[in-house]
Amino acid sequence: MKNTILSLAAVVALAASAGAALEFSPVGGWPRLPPAKTQIGNMHGDVAVSSAGEVYVSVQDPQGGLQVYADDGTYLRTIASAPPDFHGFVIRQQADGEFIYGARMRGQEALKLTLTGTVVLALPASAIPEEFKNKNAQTGAANVLFTGVDVAPNGDIYVTDGYASDYIHRFSSRGTYLSSFGGKKEPYSFNTLHKIAIDTRFQPARIIGTDRANNRIVHLSLDGQFLGVVAKDLLLPAAVTISGDYAVVAELGGRVTLLDKMGAVAGRLGANTGEGVGSNKLPPAQWQTGLFLSPHGVALNARGDLFVSEFNAFGRVHRFNLGR
């Protein structure tokens, strides 16, 4: 299989102020499969890490769509009450506890759950005004397909309808609908605003989004003003998270890119130009440790170790350890 990668040790030289490089080393055989399973399961979702260091992975599986793994990759449990269609989700620590915020792709809602799966807040698509929804040209029925979610410092919840209208919908911490902005028209001109994150590198914080089919990363203010393009000419950016001074971008075209605060490329890893890139069909026997196929979700733990979930019919999660 032809491929390109910075090195087998996935060394990423970042333009850090100290001048030192960050080294990410791929971990083979992570995670270990759940009992009696030969694969994780069909994945079109995300990955997140709790404050305890447990790694949560969303799987499109009616018998258990949210699996939890220990730091060493040991399967711990499946949150049976979680929905089987969390396309994008995050875990956020708040004053009243730690919660999962998830966007259901088919379920017409976003949810706030405890880490054990109890629903404490539902944000239904029915709360969004009809003018901000895609309509079926023949039936007139609304088509809402939530793809990403995050929570602002004040508790407001932002959900993107990335597979339909390309609008971002804003709700209060209590679940009250507040506003919608974005869409396919100027000045936004989004084409699959796939996932979003709250970019806390700036004050005030802002939204950073993956405008996937436009191959770019964008910034918006928390009240919806389009602030500009952060980076362009990417390979179908699918997910983004903030780590220190960097935005870490998972690209469906087979790599992860690190962007500095100015949007310049600070490093890349796992780049792959071989067979199966961008597809979810390549069988496990043809995978190579440290080389991506279709990155779809990205998260880091408190130590800075990187986790990347893929769009993959068999289920695939990568781990890269930082500096070890």
Image (spheres, helix red, strand yellow):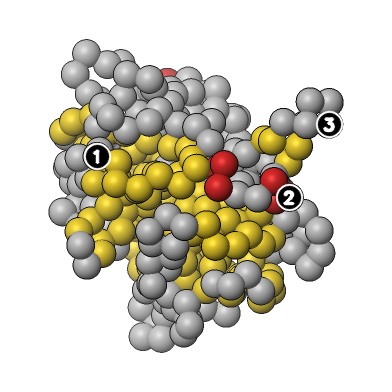
Is 144 above or below relative to 298? above
Marked residue nearer the N-terminal end (1 or 2):
1
Is 40 above or below relative to 170? above
Q: Residue at x 27, y 52 (%)?
A: 99
- Whole-Å distance between the Cαs marked 3 and 2? 14 Å
Viewport quadrant of the C terminus: bottom left
Is 39 above or below relative to 57? above
Q: Secondary structure at mark 1?
A: loop
Q: Secondary structure at mark 2?
A: helix
Judging depth in this view, the residue of 319 and 289 nearest the camera is 319
Q: Which residue is mark 3?
A: 137
Q: Which residue is mark 1?
A: 118
Q: Residue at x 40, y 44 (%)?
A: 122
Few, some or many C-alpha atoms within 10 Å of disc 3 (few <14, some 14-19, many ≥20)?
Answer: few
- The three-letter code of the residue at mark 3 reads Ala
Marked residue nearer the N-terminal end (1 or 3):
1
Q: Residue furthest top?
A: 36
Q: Residue at x 68, y 72 (%)?
A: 226
Judging depth in this view, the residue of 31 and 139 nearest the camera is 139
Q: Which residue is mark 2?
A: 131
Does the image show residue 250? Answer: no
Question: Would you identify the image quadrant in which residue 98 lies?
Answer: bottom left
Does the CB distance between marks 1 and 3 fall below 8 Å?
no
Q: Position of residue 159 (x, y in %)?
A: 52, 53
